[in-house]
Image (cartoon, rainbow, N blue to C red):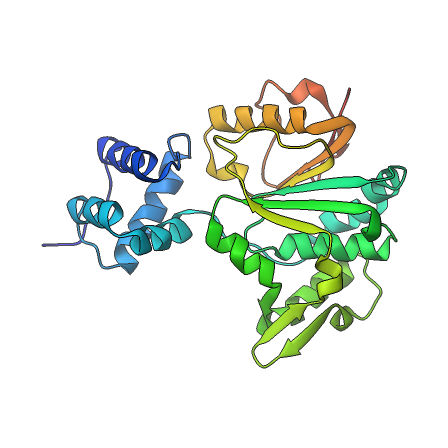
């Protein structure tokens, strides 16, 4: 039998329904084309040739499902990704947050933690880390467990150092991690105020009130309806005049929440709740 090359709308709906019924994850409002591509990639990697076999494995093998979840969820990240964004955080956002006695930040969709560690470095250099409480959440429990270790392949650190410098960093970046064989371990003291936990943007509700929410390069994988719901969630999770940062290719323009935020910097997609 030839490998399957496409998934119909009905077949995709069956898979989405199976996953929701068996595991509680709801992919119903994910952008269809993107989800379709990632499922096909998983089937190719796992050498699963048809939808019948895929549904059988997803139903009966939790290890296969964990692999599937790791493949279809978004795990692309890096430290100081988009350095101009982090430069804007340094210059426009953190000085404002310095007025709060406790600074609460939510990294939604934190993947394996690289952007969270970048935030910790910014807060440390601004003298704010002791007052910060950083809640880092992701749908995928495997990402959360990896993020908790603070371990990053050392081969990436050259690029991350360049990103850091472009973001306005002036310290010796190597002092923020310890290199051991093939890995770099982010300094434990930098991570002391980070709480990693699982959170589903599709179904979970507000769990705190934040001065800054970062959710970068996650919304682009959702359809417009789900994006709109999540912007409502973020609005309700922010303090008045709290900041929200989304990915530089994402947009607030097509949601009914666009009038409830003012633009801090359009190029880096940093916004501020109006009231």
**x and y, in percent, of residue 32 in the image:** 36, 35
Left or right: residue 10 compared with residue 206: left
**x and y, in percent, of residue 113 in the image:** 60, 55
Of residues 181 and 44, the one drawn nearer to the viewer in this rendering: 181
Q: Is 194 drawn above or below residue 229 in the view shown?
A: below
Identified at 86% across, 52% down, the residue is: 126
Left or right: residue 220 compared with residue 22: right
Q: Is 26 drawn above or below residue 53 in the view shown?
A: above
Left or right: residue 165 compared with residue 251: right
Q: Quadrant of residue 35?
A: top left
Left or right: residue 223 compared with residue 177: left
Q: Quadrant of residue 30?
A: top left
Q: Residue 68: in sight, yes or no?
A: yes
Identified at 59% across, 67% down, the residue is: 152
Q: Quadrant of residue 272?
A: top right
**x and y, in percent, of residue 43 in the image:** 26, 53
- Quadrant including the N terminus: bottom left
**x and y, in percent, of residue 109 in the image:** 56, 44
Which residue is at the far right? 99
């Amino acid at each position: 039998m030839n490998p399957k090359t496409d998934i119909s709308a009905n077949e995709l709906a069956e898979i989405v329904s199976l996953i929701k019924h068996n595991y509680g994850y709801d992919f119903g409002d994910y952008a269809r084309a993107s989800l379709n591509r990632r499922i096909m990639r998983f089937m190719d990697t796992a050498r699963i040739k048809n939808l019948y076999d895929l549904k059988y494995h997803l139903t009966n093998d939790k290890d296969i499902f964990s692999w599937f979840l790791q493949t279809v969820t978004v795990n692309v990240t890096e430290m100081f990704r988009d350095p101009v964004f982090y430069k804007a955080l340094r210059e426009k956002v953190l000085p404002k947050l310095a007025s709060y006695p406790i600074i609460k930040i939510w990294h939604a969709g934190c993947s394996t933690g690289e952007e969270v560690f970048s935030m910790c470095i910014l807060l440390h250099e601004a003298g704010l880390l002791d007052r910060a409480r950083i809640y880092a959440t992701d749908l995928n429990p495997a990402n959360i467990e990896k993020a908790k270790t603070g371990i990053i392949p050392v081969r990436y650190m050259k690029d991350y150092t360049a990103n850091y410098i472009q973001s306005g960093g002036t310290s010796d970046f190597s002092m923020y991690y310890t290199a051991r064989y093939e890995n770099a371990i982010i300094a434990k003291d930098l991570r002391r105020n980070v709480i990693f936990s699982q959170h589903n943007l599709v179904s979970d509700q507000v769990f705190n009130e934040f001065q800054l929410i970062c959710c970068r390069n996650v919304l682009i994988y959702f359809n417009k309806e789900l994006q709109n719901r999540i912007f409502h969630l973020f609005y309700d999770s922010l303090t008045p005049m709290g900041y929200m940062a989304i990915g530089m290719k994402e947009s607030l323009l097509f949601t009914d929440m666009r009038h409830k935020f003012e633009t801090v910097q359009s190029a880096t997609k940093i916004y501020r709740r109006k009231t």
